[in-house]
């Protein structure tokens, strides 16, 4: 397995316009407000963390989210421009702990701590095939 210690302290921030993939549509009436969902915003953090980590892994490795603690603080509309940032705060064995925040200007929209585990792509393929057989 790759030496993951070099990830500690690394961070990445991206400006993003929230698109329809984040639209909160669980409630028909409320969906008319065009608000972004907690799960959609969390996915933005998870993807940025993946992009941060993946260059440090071998071609045979991938990182997957295995745990998350998310706090959605303020509603935000789809089509808003946000700053989405993640930082690696700890590495233990094959687990990478990250902290993420989504901001609109000075307003915090969402914050999260989550763990991505580094695993073998072959393991994930085998497990997937076993589960479908």
Image (cartoon, rainbow, N blue to C red):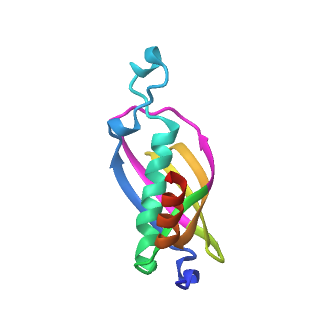
Which picture quadrant has residue 131? bottom right
Any magenta on residue 77? yes
User: Does 83 appear above or below 34?
Assistant: below
Which picture quadrant has residue 59? bottom left
Residue at point 43%, 59% (across, down) = 48
Residue 106 visible in the displayed image: no
**Residue 43 location in percent, x, y?**
46, 48
User: Does 19 appear above or below 45?
Assistant: above
Residue at point 43%, 29% (across, down) = 35
Q: Main secondary structure of the magenta part?
A: strand
Q: Which residues are magenta?
A: 67-87
User: Residue 129 versus residue 59: which sits nearer the camera?
Assistant: 129
User: Does 36 appear above or below 48?
Assistant: above
Residue at point 38%, 26% (across, down) = 34
Residue that sits furthest to the top in the current view: 29
**Residue 73 location in percent, x, y?**
58, 38
Query: In the shown orientation, is residue 74 left or right of residue 51?
Result: right
User: Residue 62 versus residue 41: which sits nearer the camera?
Assistant: 62
Which corner quadrant holds the N terminus? bottom right
**Residue 130 location in percent, x, y?**
53, 59
């Amino acid at each position: 397995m790759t030496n993951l210690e070099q990830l500690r302290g690394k961070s990445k921030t991206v400006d993003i316009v929230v698109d329809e993939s984040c639209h909160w549509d669980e409630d028909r009436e409320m969906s008319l407000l065009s608000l972004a969902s907690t799960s959609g915003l969390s996915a933005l953090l998870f993807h940025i963390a993946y992009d941060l980590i993946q260059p440090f892994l071998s071609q045979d490795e991938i990182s997957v989210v295995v745990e998350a603690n998310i706090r959605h603080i303020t509603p935000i509309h789809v089509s808003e421009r946000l700053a989405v940032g993640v930082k690696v705060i700890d590495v233990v064995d094959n687990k990478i702990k990250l902290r993420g925040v989504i901001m609109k200007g000075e307003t915090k929209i969402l914050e999260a701590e989550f763990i991505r585990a580094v695993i073998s792509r072959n393991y994930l393929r085998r497990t997937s095939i076993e589960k479908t057989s």
